[in-house]
């Protein structure tokens, strides 16, 4: 595979299209899906229009973050630091990392933990209910406009049967799972 994000997943390069990868301890690694977007594609107005200003050039890397917890958040933080546009997809309850504290301190209602704030810097967020068919369809519309998808097990929006890495690859052949 190619270069990874935080030692997990891979970006464009070898590997089979449906690989998720396993780290040395046997845990599933974050799967990174890289798109090869063609010049003839049309943007999807339902979701794509509100994420980029009209007239803004479409020459940057667009990443849809379907991960949860630290590995995916760190991977997309690195991509954001490199200039990528990150769209974090969360369930209506929010990512569990929002309410996590390394010290065990309670996070006040409506507030976010320090690690979430650090790893979420420079990202945009959308709310998708993975159990809602209309929301899952809207997420697929967003994937049409993406260059990269970062996916990890446990993310409620990614739990929809059509949003497993293999299904994403089938539905969006412009994406490559590495």
Image (spheres, helix red, strand yellow):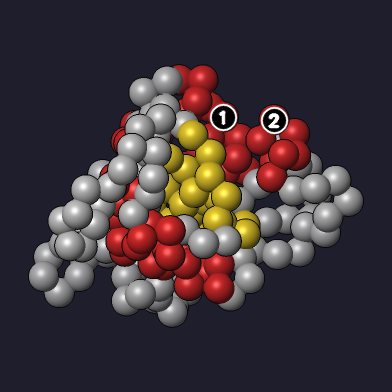
* Residue 178 visible in the snapshot: no
Front residue of this view, candidates 60 and 127 = 127
User: Which residue, as the protein is rendered here, is positioned at the far top?
Assistant: 133
User: Which residue, as the protein is rendered here, is positioned at the far right?
Assistant: 55
Pointer 2: residues within 10 angstroms few (<14), some, or many (20+)?
few
Task: Work out how far the residue at label 1 is from the one at label 2, CA to CA, in angstroms.
Answer: 8 Å
| Image vertical order of residue 47 relative to residue 150, above or below | above
Q: How many marks?
A: 2
- Residue 156 place in picture, x, y as percent: 32, 36
Which corner quadrant holds the N terminus? bottom left
Q: Secondary structure at mark 2?
A: helix
User: Which residue, as the protein is rendered here, is positioned at the far bottom?
Assistant: 3
Q: Are marks 1 and 2 in contact (CB under 8 Å)?
A: yes
| Image vertical order of residue 26 relative to residue 41, above or below | below
Q: Secondary structure at mark 1?
A: helix
- Residue 72 place in picture, x, y as percent: 37, 60
- Residue 132 place in picture, x, y as percent: 42, 20
Q: Work out whether mark 1 precedes mark 2 in sequence or the reverse, and give the earlier one.
A: 2
- What residue is at 45 percent from the left and 20 percent from the top? 133
| Image vertical order of residue 38 relative to residue 26, above or below | above
- Residue 78 place in picture, x, y as percent: 48, 72
Front residue of this view, candidates 63 and 83 = 83
Residue on which disc 1 sits: 138
- What residue is at 27 percent from the left and 63 percent from the top? 29
* Residue 112 visible in the snapshot: yes
Which corner quadrant holds the C terminus? bottom left
Residue on which disc 2 sits: 46
- What residue is at 88 percent from the left and 51 percent from the top? 55
């Amino acid at each position: 595979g190619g270069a990874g994000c935080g030692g997990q997943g891979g970006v464009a390069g070898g590997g089979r299209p449906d690989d998720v990868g396993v780290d040395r301890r046997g845990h599933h690694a974050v799967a990174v899906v890289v798109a090869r977007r063609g010049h003839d594609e049309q943007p999807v107005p339902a979701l794509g229009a509100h994420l980029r200003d009209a007239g803004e050039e479409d020459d940057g890397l667009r990443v849809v973050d379907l991960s949860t917890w630290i590995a995916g958040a760190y991977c997309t933080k690195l991509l954001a630091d490199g200039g990528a546009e990150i769209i974090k997809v969360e369930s209506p309850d929010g990512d569990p990392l929002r309410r996590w504290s390394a010290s065990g301190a309670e996070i006040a209602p409506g507030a976010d933990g320090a690690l979430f704030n650090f790893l979420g810097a420079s990202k945009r967020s959308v709310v998708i209910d993975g159990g809602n068919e209309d929301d899952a369809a809207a997420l697929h519309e967003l994937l049409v406009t993406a260059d990269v998808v970062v996916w990890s097990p446990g993310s409620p929006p990614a739990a929809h049967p059509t949003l497993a890495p293999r299904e994403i690859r089938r539905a969006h052949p412009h994406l490559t799972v590495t």
